[in-house]
Amino acid sequence: MSPVVLSIVIPVYNTANYLESCLSSVLAGDWADCEILLVDDGSTDGISPGLCDRLSEAHPGLVRVIHQENLGLGGARNSGLEAARGEYLFFLDSDDTIPPHALTTLKEAIRKTGAEIIAFQFLTDDGEGHRTPYCANAVQLDTPFTTRQKPEFLLSIPSACCRIWRRSLFLSSGIRFPSRVWYEDLRTTVKLFVLAKSIVTLPDPLYHYLQRPGSIMRSGNVARNREILDAFDDLLSWFQRQGLLKQYHAILCRLCIDHVYLAASVRVLTEAPRHPLLGEFQRYLEHHFPDYRSNLYLAHLSRSRKLVFRLLEGRHYRLLRFLFRTKGRLA
């Protein structure tokens, strides 16, 4: 049996309508030296578990299936990680796809760089054929670097899906995705960014992210946005234990502005412009980063984020709600 270079981990939870398209997009590429792990995370639709089995039977030796009780997205990824044989891990959500050249490009990057993290861009798909390129990474550099050299890489979108990861990075650190929580990526990938001895970024959009109403972060459960504070507490505690809190203070402040103050506030106010979480988010930022208004990385905010920042500072929540219901995105 030849060594597996890339393990593609696909968590599945009641996504039978999308899974075949997802898998077909992988099979359309060069899947030699790859394995595909379908992790059925306790699906309850009566269709997804059997579909996973049929897809595995149709592609013996390539597609393996793991059936488990529901552990959430993080727990499903962990199960795939533990069962994987590949040198690298690629986490692919079952309602998303990849372009035909993605695997070839990624394996070539592995061969050329051997980096512990190979990051790339993605396209958002509105489900009606409109795809928009999105820059996922705050540093664009095809030669290896670390976050000590380029700390601003921590400002990248924290998604696990728009990177491939050397499996040993998880195994040596003991870091795993938390189960049954929101913001599992933020709680996990930022730590791995810091620990990685080599990171490269590719300019290619190698991931197609489907924006669908039923996805976790679009569920409309306003109260669960408070979990961003738990996620950030976890990050700050980890940096403290590593002795890195002072070194990364400025970047962590900007990260808190991005994820707690801007993004989480927008998610809440679009549903409930008077929700008490809005004040709680601001108090959290002021408590942990009282100097946040003078943060050197604020100058790098996009124009739209600067506008959101100013409106939040002035507590113009209804105006923000109107803008986001009109435009629909934080860029």
Image: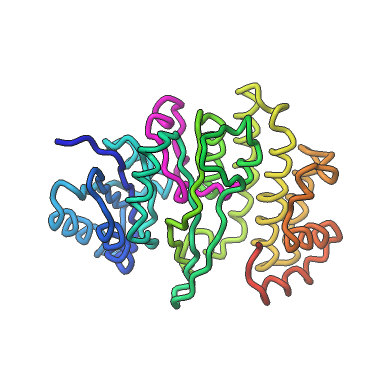
**Left/right of residue 190 with respect to residue 287 in the rendered view:** left
User: What residue is rendered at 32% in x and 61% in y?
Assistant: 22
Highlighted magenta segment, given as a residue range: 156-179
Across and down, in percent, residue 195 comes to 53, 29
Q: Quadrant of residue 237?
A: top right
Q: How many marks?
A: 0
User: What residue is rendered at 26% in x and 36% in y?
Assistant: 85
Scheme of colours in the image: rainbow
Q: Front-most of 135 and 7?
A: 135
**Left/right of residue 69 with respect to residue 330 in the rendered view:** left
User: What residue is rendered at 69% in x and 38% in y?
Assistant: 252
**Left/right of residue 85 with respect to residue 292 in the rendered view:** left
Across and down, in percent, residue 66 comes to 25, 46
Picture quarter with the N terminus: top left
Q: Residue 265 magenta-drawn? A: no
Compared with 274, 118 (above or below) is above
Across and down, in percent, residue 306 comes to 78, 58
Q: Front-most of 194 and 292?
A: 194
Q: Residue 177 magenta-drawn? A: yes
Picture quarter with the C terminus: bottom right
Q: Quadrant of residue 145?
A: top right
Across and down, in percent, residue 20 comes to 27, 64
